[in-house]
Every structure is written in C-alpha cells, then in structure tokens.
Amino acid sequence: MKNKIKTKLYFKVNLQIFLLLVATFAFAYSLKESSDEAKVKGDVQINKSGIISDILLLIGKTIFNEEALVSAQEAVYTCIKSKDGKTCQEYPSSICSSECAVDCIPSRRDSVGECKPGTCYDKTEGTCQVNAPKASCDILGGKWLDDPKGNVAECRKGCCVMGDQALFSTEQQCSRASSVLGLQKKFRPEIRSELSCLGLAKTQEEGACVFEKENENTCKFTTKANCLQIGGKFYTGTLCSNSELKTNCKPQVKAECIEGKDEVYWFDSCGNKENIYDANKIKSYNNGKALSKAASCVVESGTNFLGNSANCGNCNYLRGSKCGKKTTTQKLADSSIDAVCRDLNCIDKDGNKRINGESWCQYQSSTGSDGKRSTDVPGSRQFRENCIDGEVKIEPCADYRNQICVESKTPLKNGYQFSSSACRVNKWQECMSYNSFESGEESGEESGEEEERDVDPKCGANPDCFIRHVEIGDKLNFDMCLPKYAPGFDLATGGQGASGLCSAANKKCRVTYQKPKFFGSWSCKKNCECMKDKFVEELHDVCMSLGDCGAKVNYQGVLTKNYKIKVSEKPPIGKEPEISGGYLSGISGYHKPIKGKIIDPGEEYLRTFGSPTGDDLLAISGVGGIVAAAQGSFPGQTETTTTVITGGTSGVTGSAVQDNSNSITGSAITGDTIAPITGASGTEVGGSETGNPNSDPGTGATESGAANSGASSGALSSVSNLLGGGGKGGGGGQDKDLATAAMVLGLAGSAAALGLAIAGAAAAATVVGLAVALVVALIYLASQQETKIIIVEFRCYAWQAPSGGADCKKCGSDGLPCSKYSCASLGQSCKLINEGNPQVECIDGNPNDAGAPVISPLYSNITQGYNYTNVSENGFKITSRQECLRAYTPVTFGIETNEPAQCRFDTNHTARFEDMADEFGYNLYLRNHSAIINIPSLESLGIGGFDPKRRADYNLYIRCQDANGNKNIKEHNINFCVEPGDDITAPAITSRVPALEFTKFGATDLNASIYAAEPVECRFDERDIDYDVMINNFTCNTGYDPTNFNGWRCDAALPVTKNETILNIRCKDQPWYNVTNESKRNKNTESYKFKIKKSLSPMKIDSITPDNNTIITSGVQPVTVKIEARTSGGMDGTATCYYLFANQSILFYDTIEKSVHINIFNQFSPGNKELPVRCVDRAGNSAEKTAKFIVKIDTEAPEVTRVYSLSGLTIVTNEPAECAYKTFVQRTEEECGFDFKNATLMSGTDLVHTSEFNPGLTYYVKCKDPYDNNLATCNLVVRGGFNVPQQL
Amino acid sequence: MFRNNYKENYTLFFMESKRAKKGQVTIFIIVAIAIVGLIAATVFFLPRIQEAIAPGGFSPSAYLKDCIEPEIKPAVENLAKHGGYLEPEGFILYDGEKIKYLCHSSEFYQTCVVQEPMVKNNFERQLSGIINPRAEQCFSNLKREYEKRGFAVSAGKGSILLEIITGKVRLSFVAPFTATKGETTQTFKQFDIETLSEMYELLFIAQSIVDFEAAYGDSETTLYMQYYHNIKIDKRKLDDGSKIYILSNTVTKESFTFASRSLAWPPGYGFE
C-alpha cells in the first residue's frame, strides 16, 4: 500500500477536528464571558474575556505543528461599521471586506480603539450602558469610561426616593427625575437592591392633608411632602373621612382598584383612597385611621389563597392575586363593587396549578442520561414556562440543546412546592474534552510516548456529562465521558460535520476463530464478545450520546436507524451481531417526556456557573482526548480510525481481471473530498495475514507463527530434499501449516529411511523409529489449527430524519413553538416557512416527488488527467490517458444526483438499495457525492508477476434514495481498470514533533518524533551522509496503518549537545521488502534537517503588579484590578501566563508568547488577595510568582476633623476630599440637599479646604471623597463665631 | 409687560378718585380695595391666562397641542416598533418589520456589542426628526392664526426641544413670540406641549435588558415583570440566535420592540 499524499489529506481531517476544538474552547470562553462568578482564593471574583484566538493559537502550537496552525486558524478582523449598519463586528478575515462598509482592521475588537468596550455614561440622564464601544458612546455625547462592567462611581446605584415614589438609579438619574417631576429627592446609596428600594416606596407615610376649599374643609390623602406643597395640614395615618377632621369627605362610598397597587381599596366621597376593602366595613374603617396591609383582612383561607376573596380585597401579588375587574366566577359578595382579587395563577400543560411568578421546565422528550445513554431525541427542545399574571408564557431555551432547562423547587409554608427554572448553557462540549490523554509536562506525542486514554474525574463532577463504561470483554472495555444532554445537529443542511463527530463512536474488532485442521469444528478464540449483540449495542449507546447520531426517534416518535454493522464474512459459528429489537423498542420511547423528571441545576454548577470547570492547561491536553476519542481504538489495538473520522468505509472491494471475485483489498472510498481514506481497514486484513506488526498481538502471534513455520519448513525442506524425503517449503498463510506438516512427516520419513540405510540390522530400532515418527507426525497434525479472522465493524452515522414530509404538520402541534430544528426532524422534505415570524409553519416542501434520483458523473470533481467516459444512464467509466488507472495513484471522482439523495455502493450486484454494503460518502442527503480512491498495486491485489499487460478491473454499483424515499431500482455502474505502477519515489518526512526547535533549559536530550507519508525506517546522524552509513536508528511504525492523521511516526531520543544542534535524518520506504527485495526500496538522498536549540537560561517572572500588598481602593464594588506580569529568560523571554484558582489554571487575557502579560479582573471583592501566576514558554520552561494585594472599598463619606477661620473659612477632612458650600439666609428644606455642581467649591482637594468667609452668613458645607462618597446631608454648618457639626 | 399695563390703569383710576366727593370716600376706598385685589389677582394669574386665553378666547398652547399631538403618538409608536429607528440599519426582519439590533454579535459564542448605548437619547433624536417639520409648520400656522386675528406677529428663529421624560413626551417650542394688536401685546418665550406616554420607562427597561445581553448573553425578564406590574416583556428566540424583545405597558398599551443577538450557538459543533 502506498500513501504518498496521505499526510496532506490527513491534514484536512486534522483541520476538521481542529474546528471541533475551536468550538469547544470558544464555548469555554463564552462561559467565562457569561459570568463573573468565578472565585479566586475564596472570595476574589474574577473575569476574563476575548481569548479565543489566543487559545487557538496556543492549542495550535501545542497540538499541531506550525504549518497546521497557519493553515487552520483564520484570523479574525474587526469591522467598525458593517454594510448592514452594525458597529464593531468581528468577521473571519476572508469575508470581512465583503461584509464591511469601511476597511477591516486586522485585529480583534478589543484591540481597536473605537470598539474598545467600556461603560457609556449619559451625563444628563445619569444612566450607564455597559459594554459599549467607545466610538458609539462618544458620537452620542456620552462619557465613555474605561470599565466595561460599569464598576465606576458614576454608575453606582442607590435608592432615589421622591415623595411616595422610589427609583433604583444612579444619583444623577435621581437628580434628573427629581427635577422633571418637581419632587424633593433623597438619594440613598446604601440601599443596593432594587427590591429593597421599591419596597421603600411603599413605606412612605401617608395621611390626611386637610385644607380649605370653597369655605369648607376638604381633604386629600397623600404624603407629608405633597401635603406641604399643597399647603394643607397633615394628619399622619389618618383617613380623610375621619370625623375628627371635620372634612366634607364621607367614608367608604365605593371600592376600586388603584393603578400601581395590587389591592382593592375603599374610596371616600372626595375620591381619596381609604383602607383595603373588607366586607366588614367597621373593621376596615378602623376608626378613621389607616390600616396597614398586614393588619387588614386576609384573602387566603386555609390552603386556598383566595378563599376569602368574596369578602376581602387584600390581594397578594406574590401569592397570585391582584385587583382586577370582577368576572362571573370571581367577584365580591357585594355585587355593587366591580373590583375583586383576581386569580393570577395558571394551569400548566399537565393540568397542574402554578402560582403567579412560578416558572418551570417543559421538555419535548426524555432528557438526560438513563445511565447508559443520552436520551434526548432529534428535534426536541427544552422550554421554560412562566406564569405571569394568569398567563403562561413560553420561553424556548436555545435550540439544538445548546441550553437546557433546569428547575428547582422550594417548599412554601403551606407545603406547596414553588418551582423556579432557568435556561442555562449545556456544557456538553466540555464532556468531550474530559476524554483526555494522561497529561504531564511532556506527554503525548511530544514525549514520543504512547498516549493512554483516560477520563478526567471532572467528568463526574460536571452535571452535564456522564461516564459511560463500555465493557464488552476483558480487553474491550473503556470509559468515555459523554454529554448527558446530547447536542442537536443542523438536520436541514445535511450535517457533514455531524457525521465526523458521530464517527467518533466507530469501532472495529477482530474476532479470531480456530478449528483443528483435521478433526473438530470451529470455535471462537479471541474477541468473541464482538460477535455478540452487546458489542454493537454498547457502541450504539456511545454513538447516540455524541449528538444526533445513530438510531433514534424524532420528537414525534418516528425511528430512523443511522448506523452500520459490517462483518467481513459470515462467522463460521453463531450469528452476526445486531442491535436487537428489544434495544430499539427501548430507545423508541424516548420521545415521551418522563413525567416529573426535571434537571436539577446542580449546586456545583451554580457555584461555578459560567466559569471554566477545566484547567486550561489540562484542557489543552484534553484536546488530545478529543482526538483520542475520535481515533477511538480499543486498548491493545493500534488501528486508528482516521477512516472513521471521515466516515470512510473499509476497503472497496473490486474484482481482479483474472478472478472476478470480490477479493481485492486495499482501496477505500469516502464520500468527502477533503477526507480521503485509503483503505486502512481493508489493508488490515491483508496486513494481518502477512504478519503486520501492528496487528492484534494474539492474531499477529498466530500468523507470525505461521510465517515462521513456513520459513522453517522451507529450511527444513531443503534438508529433507537432501535426505530424499518429501515436503515442500510453503509461503505464508494457511497453506504453510499443511506444508510444514508434510515437511515434518517428510523429515521423519527421511530420518527413518536414513536409519534403515545406515543400520538395517537394527529393525527394532527402526520400528520404534517409525512409530516415534508417526506419533510425532500425528501429534503435530492434531495440534495444527485453521484460523479465521473476522472483522466486525460498528459505524455510527449522523441521524437523518425520516424520508418524506407526511409528519411536517405535526410541528408545533404540542403547543410548543416549531423551530427549524424540530421541523427538519420530522421529515426529509419538511421545510420551515415564515421563519422568524409568528406565522412560522412547517410544511412538506416536496409533496409530489415520486421519481428516484437521476445519477450522473460529477464533472466538477475529477482528478486532472482523468475523465468520465462511456457515460450512459446505466453508468460510466473512469479512464486516464492510458485508459487504465495507474496503481498507487489517488483519484478523486464522484456522482451527482438531480436532487438531494443518500447514495450507497456495492462491488457485488444487489437487489435493493437497503442491501448495498456501504454509503457512497456519508449517509447524508446531498446532490454532490465525492470520493477519493487510492489505486492499489496489482501485487497487493494478488496479481503478481512481471507482465506489463496485467490489468485489474473494478466495478462499483450504486443506488441512491431521495428525501421522499424514492430509490433507484436499477444499479448505476462505475467501472475502471488498474495497470501496474511501481513506487519509485523517496519517502517524504512531513512533520516533526516537537515543532519547536527550542528545548527546555538544562535538557540533554529531546524525545522527538518525525512523521512520514508512508511506512518507513529512518536513521539520523550529525553528519549529512548516506542512509546506509548512518548509525542512529529511529523506532518506526512500519505497519500499513498510519500512527495517526499525521502519518507514520518514528521516535528517538535525540542528543542535545550544543547550543544549536542540527541532525540529519534519512529514511527508506517499503520496509516489507527488507532484506528480501532491498532494491525496490527508495531512500532519501537529501537529509531532513532537525534543528534543536537550547534554552540558555531558566524562565523568570521579573515583576508582577500589583504586589507587596499594594492597597487598591475603590468606591464601588466589585473592583477592577489589572494584573501585569513581566517575563524574561527561558527560550526567548516570551511566555504564556496563567493565573491559578480552585486548582485550575486560566489563561491570561493578553499573554500568548509575550514578555508583558496582562489580565484585567473586574469582579474583585474587598480583602487580602493572593493570585498565583505561572508562566510557561513553548520550550517548557516555567516560573511562578504570586501577586499580593489588598482591595479596599471606601464607602464612607469624608469627615470634617477641624474647622477654623483664618483669613477665610478653613476646614480639614480626614481623607482627601472635595468640599462645597451654599449659603442660605433662612433654613429651608433644601439647605443640605444641594448638588455639588450647584454649590460653591472650596479650594483644595486634599485634606485642607479653604474659602472666603462672611460671618454674617450661614455656610452649609458638604464634602465628598474621590469615590463620590458623601453624606446625604451637610458635613458642617458654619455660622459666624461658631460652628455646628452636622449629621442632619 | 402685561403686568405694567395694569399698574398704569390702576394709577389712572386712583387719580380720578381724588376728584370725587368727600362723602363717597369710604365707598370708593372699598371699591378701590376690591379693584386692587382684582388687579393683584390678575397680575398674579396673568401669565397663565395669557397662555390659556389669547384674544378672542384663543390659546396658543392649546392650538399647538391640537396641531402637533396627533403626530406625536403615531410617531412614537412607529419608532418603538423598530427599536427606536424609523429606518433602522443593522436590523432583523421580523414579522415584516425591521427591528433594530440594540446589541449584536455576528460571531457565535460571543456576547454582543452594544449598538445603541443611549437608547433614550437616540429615540428623542429620531422622534425630533419626525416631529420637528410638523412642529415648525404648526408654529408657522400659529403665527398665521394670530395674523388672521389682526395681530402683528414677531417671532424669532427658535428651537424645538423634544424630551422623553417620566410619564410624558414633552415638546418645547423655545422661540420668542410677540403678538401685538393695538395696545395689546402678548409675549411668549416658550410653549411646552406634553403628551402622556410611558415610553421613558420602556426605554430604560430596554437599556437594562441590553446591559444583561451584553454582559451575560441573555436576560431574565420575569423579574422586571414582577417588580413592575404594568410591564410585560415578551422574548422571542429565533433560530439564528437572535432574540426579539417586545416590552409593553399593560395600562397604556404602548410597546417597544428591539432585537439582540448575543452568545449565539451554532448547531452541534458548528460546522455541519
């Protein structure tokens, strides 16, 4: 087998996985962005942002080589104004200019001045908008403040009390509202919650305000402040109709609702509100005194929250009642009154009563894991439902299960379980990253050691993951961390990426059968469990937990099977494994939600919500975990599933010209142009039989035993020939055993004959000799076994909706909104119309399609130099200029269908689409179906010899099925022939690990690997000399299967002797010709240069700020702190830094390979802080240092400590402050309530403040510190000759 | 100015009374006190009267209010339907309407960038753009109305200030305006027209929701509704990750609609 281009192609696979990683880490990032709750050392809250690109850079450099990085990671540019009018958007560099109305800036948004996020402060209104780009704020005349989270004095909120109103606002907002409403304000910064503030509004004291109008006493029930404005006399807590006030207001003439209040109130004849309605008028009247809500009647009776609603108007909003118009069923006993406490509670879909304000989850299917597999089904979504004022509101969580609905219940005093729910991020991507390699300083490929797959214990702690223990047999067991709530895929677009992900569950297993050669029957000897249903069922559990993969029902309960079980040949005993009917019927019930089942928020999750749960460093090695998961090999087996990743199939069997059977192995076909597969699994069979060193150890032993016996038999046969005995040396394979047996017999016979010839007289001895020979021969023959290896393969495909569109109209029939995802899950031809509108509908997009897909060659995709010929409705031929396709050559070709279709092929004639062996490409419904086939050598196909006219002919038979289930009845035939071709090209070394030339400081050797594009043997030397003369060997994978998608790996510990060492590496291909046919092997004539540089000094963190317990003071909490670390030494002084908290390392915001590293935290609480920082360079040099600082919150207003008159007024404050004063001739309400901007500022902003002083005036002085802390009243009132310290 | 004229009239009357007979002094004094009281009352209430009732029962404020108010409500409604813009840029088409993104991220996995940091200011600016031409026209019509009534009008080039404040939309014509007819002169410095509207509250709740969207990628709307019982918030999630927020006041039936796209996720791993 030959794979010269494999590395290049594998790189594309690599890219695909890389993209997968992008999603994973970007996701982690988004979580970090979405919360600021992460804690450092107990109570330090931290936050970071904008690191995707940097993380990718690091991942790329850590996991992949530099070239891969450059190719795989596309830069993100910032567009200040997009063509459709959006500001400060980021786009991939390739599309930025087409999206942007101005020039794109080659930088991330945060680095672009105009787009830098900060807080935009509206100086007039006093409002703050967080995360606002600078330019947008400036242009509108706002004041832009450099803190995106609003941790600035201007935006500090408090309670603004104005009359009976309260507003949770900034101080300026309060001033503005006060001025607009013409009300006195009192700003209370110590009140920090909106609810407390709003509560305050209701506690404003009201009473009767009596004044004279038209010669009689009348009254208004209002606050004291309002009463003063009217000029009335205020009677606190007294009703206007109180007889003692002698007003013209008569009590309790009507009962009504009041705007903004929840209760039913009595009104007097003057239109004033009185007490809460109670049918017992005397009690409600309370002798003309105001009656509090708590002292009023109770609308509840027993457990009925409205039990007394016919007689009481004390509605309770929080318990589910509010004043409203009466209805036929809800009314007061007094029929003259129109108002009543209306029931605001709701009835949910299941008929349960829900209290107003309660929210709960609604699932469209079973959800979560049942211990074996994730049970969420395609098309299902999770919803949060709220009961708001008697109406159930449905809020969908993000589709594709990117969000899940969590719910908790709190018992109320009456025993009712009050539900609260939320849509929260489903952290399923993290589950994949927990399937990591063992991580060490130098693990994995860089160490040159074999990776071991392991599940990070964090998997068990993550409420969105579960560990699936797959146990099929002694050797076939492993753990895998899987999403508990499997993600959904884009079913409408086909989902090629989804196919890649699903294929992570693909597995192959070799089952070995043996039987005595001459007596007895077949028995299974090895991996027998793989022939049991359990094997495929357990793998299917993994498959369906990866996402919308495998056999699943859609959310309306229709099952489609998207998996394949391939068995290389019929087993000699027993049946082939299958997914049982019982299993399928079990999973068919998952479309039904499990009554009463809710997803618990998970305390651990809530505690760390939004923060990365994984150590970033480990997570990086966890990338390998994903790769490992994708590679997915059983312990003890080395076959990689690169084929699996790309959905590739096992070898396309063809028919040799000499033998029209289907015995040709070695080529493969895939449906993805970027993911060519070249028959890895096909070669596996052949490889094993020729003693592939990568084959199963047991099998390999057997086969190598056969080979050895063949070899020894050859040797012995020559002896026996000499001796005149029979026997013949055989080749490899099963016939060798027979040949060996014959040879042994021959040897025994020869020995006996020789005995006769030499000692004819020794008859007895001869008889004994013959008997011995016979016994030996019999024993030998009895011990001989015939071996059969059968490969069982499980393939997991992306889930496909049922064909047709009969069920489309069911979308939304359950009363829950229909989405693109749910619509697409109902049928292949279902289409969502009016998307993004309330009139959205799922319809059958192609109801009258009854024709099967028409297949034709895909002209747009065929390798240059090749053609489609003999094209007819029955098929076509692929030809080169010489007609036949040359061995070893990769050829891309494809078919096109006139409508989206799913295609399959077989090398044998079959009767139906369903009978065909393999998918042509994925199992997706596509128009274009491409494949790459690597033409095998004729030798590998068993057509040896030197006849240049040798040919092998191939036939592929194809059928397709469209979305409506219409299938081709007739096969479409693709034919091509193969002509000889020899490998005459020297092997290519494609990459090195580590890619970095630098080694760690003090290193004396480097565990390194190189990758070649084909199986090779390699050597190295400091001298640039011929391969054969080189003396140092690499240990190479010489098997037919590549080590991974980089190709075939060779490992060695390379000496690091100088500051800069250059080693020359040369390789030789086709190791299977070793000794036997060396002349066919190609070796490098030019060396691959492997450069190694030493780190000349250890890594150092020169400085970290803040440090030495620096005090950082702020007037608001949380506090923003910038941490800056400077590094030197190591490789070149640059490094990547992490801060550590809760045993996790989090990447600095601005750090990748820099010498100055910055991270801005904006969630620090007050206290002593220690933030350990670790910086690592690419060579592995590291250093640690801890930032130590103290965060203080200053919320105390400055105090005046001295005041005196010395050529003017001088006051001294206890902290730096700014002071201002106003003078009033008479005391007024406002005297200490003035704003600084309307007052006269004193000189001095430190401790001493001066101004002129007129002893005839009274000075009302207020001071504020740099954090805007000031007393709501005056610090000081100064009159000539003496002063009055104030705390008014 | 009006106040001075009345003082003048009062002086003339007092001089005449000096020529009256001595026996009538008491009566005259009583009448004089009454007149003084009347004059004082007139002087005190003059500005309001002037505004309310011009010659022939004509009220310029009422005239302007009648002229401009019918324009304000539909304009507010129209803007509110589109996130505060008449012709928004950076919008999503929802139910046939262009809804402005007040916060948007075109990428997946990222919280949004605020597109309109000062929602109220922008709303005022947009509303002014719609109302001002009509307001100017109304102001010109006012001049013509005075002229039809025989007044000579002198009006300077003023400005029209529109503010959305708690409970109201206030339109202020800040323009010196003098109407003279014979000896009667009316001078106005400013006319304030106020229309009841709860848009102020809706806009600030919108800004608060945008804060959440920008910081956390989503918002919890239930609390707003529980704190402010007159407010209803409808959040509609679309397949592309966009959200449409419809904020409404259940009493006034006013509503404000805007869009946001923040922390959107692709299906699966994002490369299907």
Image (cartoon, grey):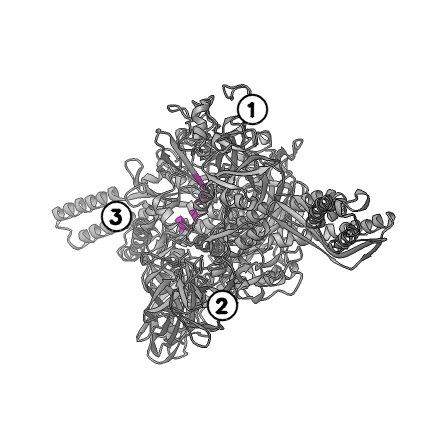
- Disc number placed over residue A745 in the picture, else none: 3
Which residues lie in the magenta part?
A421-432
- Do the residues at pointers 2 and 1 share their chain? yes
Q: Do residues under tags 2 and 1 come within 8 Å of each other at their CB atoms?
A: no
Q: Give me the C-alpha separation between circle 3 and circle 2.
A: 136 Å
Closer-to-camera residue (A667/B230)? B230
The amino acid marked with disc number 1 is Asp
Secondary element at tag 1:
loop
Up the image or down, A73 lies above or below A1026; here it is: above
Q: Alpha-carbon neighbours of circle 1 within 10 Å: few (<14), some, or many (≥20)?
A: some
**Left or right: A1049 as drawn, with respect to A19:** left
**Residue A916 can be seen, yes or no:** no
Instruction: Please tell me whether mark 2 or mark 1 is closer to you in this view.
Output: 2
In this view, the mark in front (3 or 2)? 2
Nearest the viewer among B109 and A241 is: A241
Q: Residues within 10 Å of mark 2 (few under 14, many from 20)?
A: few
- Dot 2 amino acid type: Gly
Q: Quadrant of the N terminus of chain B?
A: bottom right
Residue, disc 1: A338
Q: Tell me residue A1281's x, y (percent).
A: 42, 69
| Mark sitting earlier along the chain (2/1) | 1
Please give the name of the residue rendered at 41% of the width and 26% of the height, measured from the top-left corner: A300
Of all chains, the one bearing label 2 is A
Which residue in the protein does label 2 denote?
Answer: A1256
Are discs 1 and 3 less than 8 Å apart at CB? no
Is A601 situated above or below A614? above
Are labels 3 and 2 assigned to the same chain? yes
| Residue A364 in view (yes/no) | yes
A632 falls in the magenta region: no
A164 or A197, which is in the foreground? A164
- Pick the residue in front: A509 or A155: A155
